[in-house]
Amino acid sequence: AIERTLSIIKPDAVAKNAIGEIIARFEKAGLKVVAAKMLHLSEEKAGGFYAEHKERPFFKDLVGFMTSGPVVVQVLEGEDAIARNRDLMGATNPKDAAPGTIRADFAETIDANAVHGSDSPASAEREVAYFFSADELCPR
Ligand code: CMP
């Protein structure tokens, strides 16, 4: 089915000037960007986004990292977009990420892991709405 998923290019990848290379991978895989913006997240905005991880030991570091510099958030649309994006990203820990995936090629650590992608239809719906209003989505 045609799906939408939320993608974040994290501060480490923005700092590496890899925004274009990462978006090119999405486009080459048949995913379309239907919304995009650059943001420097506040603690409140980053903490709310990752609320499900609030009790995890890595939460504070995660929020610190995600507020350390600008990010690019985008909505990707396409056939099986959620799983396709996760395949392109590779495993959360870049040490486990398959060769040729975004995290294998651009990420250094499990915290600075270059990208985020929604992990299910329910989280995609929540995450897209967390960053974008309906009139910011451009169906194409
Ligand atoms: P992301 O897909 O953005 O979702 C939560 C983030 O927490 C994850 O990528 C990692 O960057 C970060 N993180 C840090 N430590 C862990 C861990 N032990 N397990 C899962 N995620 C972690």
Image: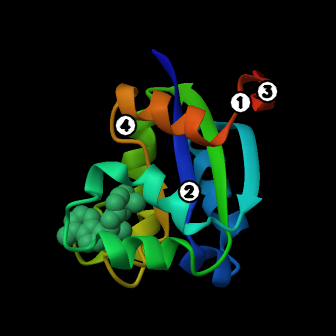
Mark 2 and mark 3 in contact (Cβ < 8 Å)?
A: no
Asked if residue 71 shows in the view, the reply is yes
Q: For residue 60, which quarter of the picture?
A: bottom left
**Amino acid type assigned to the residue bearing label 4 in the image:** Ala
Q: Provide the residue designation for mark 2.
A: 45
Task: Tell me where residue 24 appears, x and y as whole percent.
Answer: 67, 56
Q: Residue at x 74, y 28 (%)?
A: 137
Where is the N terminus found, in terms of image quarters?
A: top left
Q: CA distance from mark 3 to mark 1?
A: 11 Å
- In the foreground, 105 or 39: 39
Q: Closer to the N terminus: mark 3 or mark 1? A: 1
Q: Residue at x 64, y 78 (%)?
A: 69
Q: Provide the residue designation for mark 4.
A: 83
Q: Provide the residue designation for mark 3.
A: 138
Q: Provide the residue designation for mark 1.
A: 133
**Amino acid type assigned to the residue bearing label 1 in the image:** Ser
